[in-house]
Amino acid sequence: MHESELIACRKCPRLVAWREQVAREKKAAFRDWVYWGRPVPGFGDRNASVMVVGLAPGAHGSNRTGRMFTGDASGDFLYPALYRAGFCNQPASTHREDGLQLNALYITAVARCAPPQNKPSREEIMNCLPYLIREIELLPDLQGFVALGSIAFNTLLYIYKMHFGIPFIEKPLFRHAALYRFSDAPWLLASYHPSRQNTQTGKLTPIMFDKVWEKVRELLG
């Protein structure tokens, strides 16, 4: 699977229609932008030890910029935290050519097209699954996952079962900062998603989020 194949994907009619409509109509603040309006590939360090998995591109964030968590409120919360923890070279992410570089991390999502109301269907997530598995396979030094939100967490559990062959006697439960280790697969660390809904209500604070990345540092030794 090449990145070009992912970018050309049109498997989900509802998502294709929505991402293209958003790219045409735009948001007033971004009317001068040429929106990306296509599936968004993961990006980062090809020798990454950790894969960060989010939910889906934001309609006026990644769907506009073409890079995960770039140009919206979630990214405005995520990248400063990664910068404080030493996982990237700058605290802001505004567009694909802004010079952002990730260190030891690869960032991706379970769905690659902006979904209406930020809610991809189960079928849409399953259509996207091969792309995520392929990205996992392309990281030879992968030690663990950080799941941002319950949908990313549960999708990764499915991958643990189907791809890594982990038989869950007791299913891991999603809760913020929960860590799960496996004998023959990467570890899994859960975090609330840095969505505006979570960060503005105080469900996820900068201190809580920093602790997640401190834990990742600890796990990497």
Image: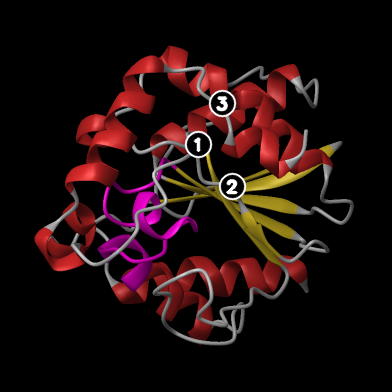
Left or right of 160 on screen, residue 137: right
Label 3 to label 2: alpha-carbon separation:
11 Å
Residue type of the residue flagged with mark 1: Phe
Residue range in magenta is: 55-76
Q: Any mark on residue 153, and which?
A: 1
* Residue 184 percent coordinates (x, y): 86, 36
Amino acid on which the number 3 mark rests in the picture: Cys
In the picture, measured across the screen, residue 134 lies left or right of residue 94, that is right
| Label 2 or label 1, whichever comes before in sequence order | 2
Q: Can you tell which mark lies on residue 128?
A: 3
Q: Residues within 10 Å of mark 3 (few under 14, many from 20)?
A: many
In the picture, the disc for residue 41 is 2
Amino acid type, residue under disc 2 in the picture: Pro
Residue at figure coordinates x 42%, y 41% from the top left = 55
Q: Is residue 119 on the magenta stretch?
A: no
Res. 186 image quadrant: top right
Secondary structure found at label 3: helix
Write the residue at 36% across / 26% down. Answer: 15
**In the image, residue 16 above or below residue 114:** above
Name the chief secondary structure element in magenta: loop
Of pointers 3 and 1, the one earlier in the residue sequence: 3
| Residue 134 x, y percent position in the rendering | 76, 35
